[in-house]
Amino acid sequence: MSRDGLARVLFGLLTLAVGVTDQGSKAIVVRHLDPSLSIPVIPGLFNLTFVTNRGALFGLLHDLPDPYRAVLFTIVPTLAVALVVLFQYRTDVAERVTQGGLALILGGALGNLADRIRFGHVIDFLDVFIGTHHWPAFNVADSSICVGVGLLLFDLLARSRRAPSPAPPEG
Protein backbone atom coordinates (compact mmCIF):
# COMPACT_ATOMS: atom_id res chain seq x y z
CA MET A 1 0.00 0.00 0.00
CA SER A 2 1.28 3.47 -0.86
CA ARG A 3 2.04 6.06 1.79
CA ASP A 4 -0.98 8.12 0.65
CA GLY A 5 -3.18 5.04 0.76
CA LEU A 6 -2.04 4.25 4.30
CA ALA A 7 -2.69 7.85 5.38
CA ARG A 8 -6.24 7.69 3.95
CA VAL A 9 -6.84 4.43 5.83
CA LEU A 10 -5.63 6.05 9.06
CA PHE A 11 -7.96 9.03 8.58
CA GLY A 12 -10.75 6.56 7.87
CA LEU A 13 -9.93 4.77 11.12
CA LEU A 14 -10.10 8.11 12.97
CA THR A 15 -13.59 8.65 11.53
CA LEU A 16 -14.58 5.13 12.56
CA ALA A 17 -13.14 5.59 16.07
CA VAL A 18 -15.18 8.76 16.58
CA GLY A 19 -18.37 7.08 15.36
CA VAL A 20 -17.85 3.98 17.49
CA THR A 21 -16.92 6.00 20.59
CA ASP A 22 -19.95 8.23 20.10
CA GLN A 23 -22.40 5.39 19.60
CA GLY A 24 -20.84 3.32 22.41
CA SER A 25 -21.03 6.18 24.90
CA LYS A 26 -24.66 6.85 23.95
CA ALA A 27 -25.53 3.16 24.37
CA ILE A 28 -24.06 3.24 27.89
CA VAL A 29 -26.04 6.38 28.70
CA VAL A 30 -29.32 4.89 27.42
CA ARG A 31 -28.71 1.66 29.32
CA HIS A 32 -27.52 3.08 32.63
CA LEU A 33 -28.62 6.69 33.05
CA ASP A 34 -32.11 7.62 34.20
CA PRO A 35 -33.39 10.66 32.23
CA SER A 36 -34.74 12.21 35.43
CA LEU A 37 -31.34 12.16 37.18
CA SER A 38 -28.14 14.12 36.76
CA ILE A 39 -24.87 12.58 37.98
CA PRO A 40 -22.27 15.09 39.17
CA VAL A 41 -18.80 14.36 37.80
CA ILE A 42 -17.19 17.66 38.80
CA PRO A 43 -19.58 19.32 41.26
CA GLY A 44 -20.61 22.80 40.17
CA LEU A 45 -19.13 22.37 36.68
CA PHE A 46 -19.91 19.07 34.91
CA ASN A 47 -22.69 16.46 35.12
CA LEU A 48 -23.77 13.46 33.13
CA THR A 49 -27.40 14.15 32.16
CA PHE A 50 -29.42 12.07 29.67
CA VAL A 51 -31.15 14.48 27.25
CA THR A 52 -32.78 13.88 23.88
CA ASN A 53 -32.38 16.60 21.27
CA ARG A 54 -35.09 16.67 18.60
CA GLY A 55 -33.69 19.87 17.13
CA ALA A 56 -30.51 20.88 15.39
CA LEU A 57 -27.46 22.52 16.89
CA PHE A 58 -28.21 23.32 20.55
CA GLY A 59 -31.88 22.39 20.07
CA LEU A 60 -32.64 24.88 17.30
CA LEU A 61 -35.87 24.10 15.39
CA HIS A 62 -36.93 21.43 17.93
CA ASP A 63 -40.54 22.64 17.58
CA LEU A 64 -40.63 22.04 13.82
CA PRO A 65 -43.47 19.59 13.00
CA ASP A 66 -42.40 15.97 12.63
CA PRO A 67 -42.61 15.29 8.91
CA TYR A 68 -40.52 18.40 8.15
CA ARG A 69 -38.15 17.95 11.07
CA ALA A 70 -37.43 14.33 10.22
CA VAL A 71 -36.75 15.12 6.56
CA LEU A 72 -34.68 18.22 7.30
CA PHE A 73 -32.57 16.58 9.98
CA THR A 74 -31.93 13.48 7.89
CA ILE A 75 -31.35 14.99 4.44
CA VAL A 76 -29.17 17.93 5.51
CA PRO A 77 -26.74 15.78 7.56
CA THR A 78 -26.61 13.21 4.74
CA LEU A 79 -25.66 15.97 2.29
CA ALA A 80 -23.09 17.28 4.79
CA VAL A 81 -21.54 13.81 5.07
CA ALA A 82 -21.34 13.60 1.26
CA LEU A 83 -19.68 17.02 1.07
CA VAL A 84 -17.12 16.14 3.74
CA VAL A 85 -16.24 12.92 1.89
CA LEU A 86 -15.89 14.95 -1.33
CA PHE A 87 -13.61 17.47 0.42
CA GLN A 88 -11.52 14.61 1.84
CA TYR A 89 -11.17 13.09 -1.61
CA ARG A 90 -10.24 16.41 -3.24
CA THR A 91 -7.79 17.44 -0.49
CA ASP A 92 -4.22 16.24 -0.76
CA VAL A 93 -3.59 13.59 1.89
CA ALA A 94 -0.39 15.42 2.83
CA GLU A 95 -2.57 18.19 4.27
CA ARG A 96 -2.83 16.29 7.54
CA VAL A 97 -4.48 18.98 9.68
CA THR A 98 -7.22 19.47 7.10
CA GLN A 99 -7.67 15.71 6.65
CA GLY A 100 -7.75 15.21 10.43
CA GLY A 101 -10.34 17.95 10.87
CA LEU A 102 -12.50 16.48 8.10
CA ALA A 103 -12.20 12.98 9.60
CA LEU A 104 -13.35 14.27 13.01
CA ILE A 105 -16.27 16.17 11.45
CA LEU A 106 -17.27 13.12 9.40
CA GLY A 107 -17.17 10.78 12.40
CA GLY A 108 -19.29 13.18 14.45
CA ALA A 109 -21.78 13.78 11.67
CA LEU A 110 -22.17 10.03 11.13
CA GLY A 111 -22.66 9.45 14.88
CA ASN A 112 -25.43 12.02 15.16
CA LEU A 113 -27.00 10.93 11.86
CA ALA A 114 -27.16 7.35 13.16
CA ASP A 115 -29.16 8.63 16.16
CA ARG A 116 -31.56 10.55 13.92
CA ILE A 117 -32.17 7.53 11.74
CA ARG A 118 -32.57 5.10 14.66
CA PHE A 119 -34.40 7.25 17.22
CA GLY A 120 -35.63 10.40 15.48
CA HIS A 121 -33.49 12.48 17.88
CA VAL A 122 -29.90 12.82 19.08
CA ILE A 123 -28.81 11.60 22.50
CA ASP A 124 -26.84 14.17 24.49
CA PHE A 125 -25.39 13.66 27.95
CA LEU A 126 -22.45 15.96 28.64
CA ASP A 127 -23.72 18.84 30.76
CA VAL A 128 -21.26 21.69 31.42
CA PHE A 129 -22.34 24.63 33.57
CA ILE A 130 -21.29 27.36 35.95
CA GLY A 131 -23.80 28.05 38.70
CA THR A 132 -27.21 28.03 37.02
CA HIS A 133 -25.83 28.85 33.56
CA HIS A 134 -25.78 25.63 31.50
CA TRP A 135 -24.19 25.14 28.12
CA PRO A 136 -26.61 23.07 26.01
CA ALA A 137 -25.98 19.35 26.61
CA PHE A 138 -23.80 17.70 23.97
CA ASN A 139 -22.13 14.38 23.12
CA VAL A 140 -18.92 12.87 21.74
CA ALA A 141 -20.03 13.51 18.14
CA ASP A 142 -20.68 17.20 18.84
CA SER A 143 -17.28 17.52 20.52
CA SER A 144 -15.58 15.86 17.58
CA ILE A 145 -17.31 18.17 15.11
CA CYS A 146 -16.23 21.24 17.11
CA VAL A 147 -12.62 20.05 17.35
CA GLY A 148 -12.65 19.23 13.61
CA VAL A 149 -13.96 22.69 12.72
CA GLY A 150 -11.34 24.20 15.03
CA LEU A 151 -8.60 22.30 13.20
CA LEU A 152 -9.91 23.52 9.83
CA LEU A 153 -9.98 27.13 11.06
CA PHE A 154 -6.49 26.79 12.55
CA ASP A 155 -5.23 25.38 9.25
CA LEU A 156 -6.92 28.15 7.27
CA LEU A 157 -5.37 30.84 9.47
CA ALA A 158 -1.95 29.19 9.29
CA ARG A 159 -2.17 29.04 5.49
CA SER A 160 -3.17 32.70 5.24
CA ARG A 161 -0.12 33.67 7.31
CA ARG A 162 2.17 31.55 5.09
CA ALA A 163 0.72 32.88 1.81
CA PRO A 164 3.01 35.30 0.05
CA SER A 165 1.90 38.92 0.10
CA PRO A 166 0.76 40.31 -3.23
CA ALA A 167 3.33 42.44 -4.98
CA PRO A 168 2.77 46.18 -4.63
CA PRO A 169 1.37 47.82 -7.74
CA GLU A 170 3.93 49.37 -10.02
CA GLY A 171 3.50 52.99 -10.53
Image: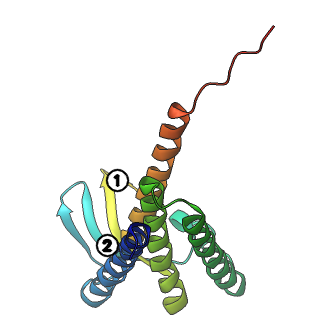
Answer with left or right where residue 78 lies relative to residue 159.
right
50 is higher (above) or lower (below) than 90: below
Indicate the quadrant containing the N terminus: top left, top right, bottom left or bottom right. bottom left
Q: Quadrant of residue 38?
A: bottom left
View extreme (front): residue: 2
Say the numbered circle drawn on residue 153: none
Q: Nearer the viewer, residue 168 or 135?
A: 168
Asked if residue 118 is positioned above or below residue 147 in the image, the reply reads: below
39 or 89, nearer to the observer: 89
The foreground one among 131 and 93 is 93
Residue type at mark 2: give it: Thr
Q: Which is nearer the eye, 116 or 83?
A: 83
Label 2: element kind: strand
Quadrant where the C terminus is found in the figure: top right
Disc 2 packing (10 Å; few <14; some 14–19; many ≥20): many
For the residues carrying marks 1 and 2, which lies nearer the camera in this image? 2
Whether residue 136 can be seen here = no
Horizontal placement of 67 versus 133: left or right?
Answer: right
Vertical order, 138 against 112 (above or below): above
